[in-house]
């Protein structure tokens, strides 16, 4: 029962800095997803914790004790690798048991228990070469879990498994990972996976944590335009606006249409901003109005449970709208009117891209 | 093969037969020579059918060479024994030193690493005769002349670079993550090396060991200069068959058959390991 503390850890390889002052605390029993685009330094962070490289600067502690400089085998860490890294000359059973130093009877019992949990009892006698990707991944997970490590590191474990299994594992993983009350750090490139599995998400961009928060917080109030763009599919719509205050209420104008954002939203007017609206929050209709943005449909992409419309607004900006598949859609080249609810809007500083305010609504993907 | 027409099959069969004949002919011919006496061998035209004799092998094993000019003592069996001892010891030492070194070169970046690796390889570039004179002077001074240890040591020039460079490639092919995983499972660096890296590089180590054994076995000049009769391997010992009364072709052939046999058996035995692709399926490709 130990928590993981990462204190302003930095690491440079030549000119690149995959870790630039990273700080994060993971409580015992908590799952924190480290999410970011490829090349943002996620794997480097995991490898510093696991002891494959040492940080140039900063400290990493497990249960209050620094592990920097300690040999990997003495850190009390379990890790599942993206490429599985199973021992090819050992059976699945020996792979799983490799981390246990116990009496033979106890080893057998624990391997049996964990493999039952992960549904791989029937392939324990096989070598990795004879396992399917899903079975390899479960074997690697079992190997990481069996020693009840203080800290559990998962490096994009669902990357190399097929879509169906990924979906199943997303459902199973949270309870599996909480079993031993380890502090879990889960690296992924898929924001849906991060939101499904994690208690908190740490968004890593260019070696820095852009935001650390619960999935709902990050989705509803992203810390910057960059974070907002990473969460959500299709990606968030942006428009250049300058909010104005009239009679104490704030409004923005997008392509000639004024939308009232309400009063007392804590945003100073007259600064150049980015307006962000998620594609799911757009409403399409054929009735014009002061608050309706005139637009033309460029393309319609049906995606089974929803349809994605590519729109060109009156000022030439292209936006995406995601609509339920039973909503009246219109066809390409139709003229339509776009509205969005004020509580779905987000404002970011135009110069820095940082969060200013709004989006009081909380909704997961 | 998908497109196995009759003509293709026949062509393939003929081509394979020709290749096998081409490569096997010297071996078969030597094998046949070893059962003939000098008169039968030097007969023109040569004959495929002959009355086999075991006299060549008898002479080699008994150490008594009967020639027209009289009886000669030869030490062929002693030479054969020397070859086995020298080559095995040289390869064993080279593996002991070379495999950890290869691992270090494959896994760690260190100052002058590539330079050292290349210097070791460059031992193979220099003609052995070039280093022999200074080497023999040093050996005389160190008292290493005509010792097993001295020859085993000089054989490292042959075996060590070969093992180092072949095994290094095999280590580089193993994903470091596999070793990291083993260390995170609570094992020391040494355990990860001996239980993960070495077994996975096994086919490469076997191949490198076999190759360097063959090179050591076939070496001639080092032992010719640095060893006297009782330490010399078969390659040098075979000189004894060039006698005052002519070249003893039959005994030479028998000596070749006897001296090739150990390496041939070793190669056939090690073939399994060479072909086995152990590291497949370890890491998703």
Image (cartoon, helix red, strand yellow):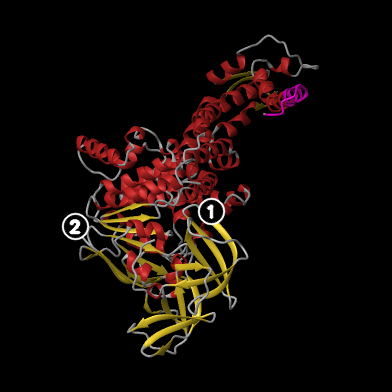
Inspect the magenta stretch and tell me whether residue A271 lies in it: no
Give the residue displayed 46% in from the left and 64% down from the top.
Answer: A37
Residue A140 is situated, as x and y percent measured from the top left of the image, at 36, 46
Pointer 2 chain:
A
Residue B233 is situated, as x and y percent measured from the top left of the image, at 54, 33
On the same chain, marks 1 and 2? The answer is: no
In the image, is residue A24 above or below residue A93? Answer: below
Q: Secondary structure at mark 1?
A: helix
Region in magenta = B2-15
**Front tag of 1 and 2:** 2
Residue of label 2: A1
Pointer 1 chain:
B
In the image, is residue A232 above or below residue B26? Answer: below
Q: Which quarter of the rendering shows the C terminus of chain A? A: bottom left
In this view, the residue in front, B119 or A66, is A66
In this view, the residue in front, B50 or A183, is A183
**Any part of residue A85 in sight:** no
Q: Which quarter of the rendering shows the N terminus of chain A? A: bottom left
The secondary structure making up most of the magenta span is helix
Residue of label 1: B120
In the image, is residue A315 above or below residue A215? Answer: below
Q: Secondary structure at mark 2?
A: loop
**Any part of residue B276 in sight:** yes
Residue A41 is situated, as x and y percent measured from the top left of the image, at 42, 65
In this view, the residue in front, A35 or A233, is A233
Residue found at the far front of this picture: A287
């Amino acid at each position: 029962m130990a928590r993981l503390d990462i204190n302003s850890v930095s690491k440079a390889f030549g000119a690149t800095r995959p870790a630039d002052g990273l700080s994060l605390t993971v409580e015992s029993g908590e799952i924190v997803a480290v999410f970011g685009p490829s090349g943002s330094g996620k794997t480097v962070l995991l490898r510093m914790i696991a002891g494959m490289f040492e940080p140039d600067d900063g400290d990493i502690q497990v249960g209050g004790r620094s592990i920097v400089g300690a040999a990997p085998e003495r850190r009390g860490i379990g890790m599942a690798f993206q490429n599985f890294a199973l021992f090819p000359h050992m059976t699945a059973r020996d792979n799983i048991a490799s981390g246990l130093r116990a009496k033979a009877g106890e080893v057998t019992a624990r391997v049996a228990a964990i493999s039952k949990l992960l549904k791989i009892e029937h392939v324990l006698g096989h070598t990795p070469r004879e396992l399917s990707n899903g079975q390899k991944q479960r074997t690697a997970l079992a190997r990481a879990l069996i020693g009840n490590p203080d800290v559990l590191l998962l490096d994009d474990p669902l990357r190399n498994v097929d879509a169906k299994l990924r979906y199943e594992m997303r459902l199973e993983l949270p309870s599996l990972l909480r079993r031993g009350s380890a502090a879990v750090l889960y690296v992924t490139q898929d924001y849906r996976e991060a939101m499904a599995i994690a208690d908190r998400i740490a968004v890593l961009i260019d070696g820095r944590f852009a935001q650390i928060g619960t999935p709902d917080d990050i989705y509803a109030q992203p810390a910057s335009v960059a974070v907002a763009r990473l969460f959500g599919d299709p990606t968030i719509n942006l428009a250049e606006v300058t909010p104005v205050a009239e009679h104490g209420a704030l409004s923005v104008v997008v392509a000639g249409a004024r939308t009232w954002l309400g009063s007392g939203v804590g945003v100073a007017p007259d600064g150049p901003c980015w307006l962000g609206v998620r594609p799911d929050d757009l409403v399409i209709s054929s009735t014009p109005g002061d608050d309706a943005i005139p637009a033309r449909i460029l393309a319609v992409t049906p995606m089974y449970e929803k349809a994605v419309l590519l729109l060109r607004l009156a000022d030439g900006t292209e936006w995406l709208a995601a609509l339920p598949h039973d909503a009246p859609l219109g066809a390409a080249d139709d003229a339509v009117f776009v509205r969005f609810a004020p509580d779905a809007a987000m404002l970011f500083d135009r110069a820095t891209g940082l969060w200013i305010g709004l989006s009081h609504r909380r909704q997961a993907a | 093969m998908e497109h196995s027409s009759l003509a293709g099959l026949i062509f393939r069969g003929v081509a394979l037969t020709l290749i096998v004949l081409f490569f096997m002919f010297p071996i078969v011919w030597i094998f046949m020579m070893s059962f003939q006496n000098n008169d039968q061998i030097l007969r023109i035209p040569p004959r495929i059918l002959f009355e086999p004799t075991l006299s060549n092998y008898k002479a080699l094993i008994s150490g008594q060479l009967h020639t027209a000019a009289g009886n000669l003592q030869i030490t062929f069996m002693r030479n054969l024994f020397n070859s086995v001892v020298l080559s095995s010891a040289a390869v064993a030492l080279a593996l002991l030193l070379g495999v950890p070194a290869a691992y270090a070169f494959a896994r760690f970046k260190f100052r002058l690493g590539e330079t050292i690796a290349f210097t070791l390889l460059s031992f193979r570039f220099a003609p052995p005769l070039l280093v022999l004179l200074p080497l023999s002077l040093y050996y005389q001074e160190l008292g290493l002349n005509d010792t097993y240890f001295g020859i085993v040591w000089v054989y490292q020039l042959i075996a060590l670079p070969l093992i180092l460079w072949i095994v290094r490639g095999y280590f580089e092919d193993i994903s470091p993550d596999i070793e990291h995983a083993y260390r995170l499972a609570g094992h020391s660096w040494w355990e990860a090396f001996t239980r993960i890296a070495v077994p996975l590089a096994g086919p490469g180590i076997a191949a490198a060991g076999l190759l360097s054994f063959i090179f050591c076995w076939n070496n001639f000049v080092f032992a010719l200069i640095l060893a006297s009769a009782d330490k010399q391997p078969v390659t040098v010992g075979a000189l004894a068959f060039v006698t005052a009364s002519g070249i003893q072709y039959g005994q030479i052939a028998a000596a070749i058959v006897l001296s090739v046999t150990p390496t041939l058996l070793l190669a056939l035995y090690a073939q399994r390991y060479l072909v086995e692709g152990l590291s497949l399926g370890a890491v998703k490709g």
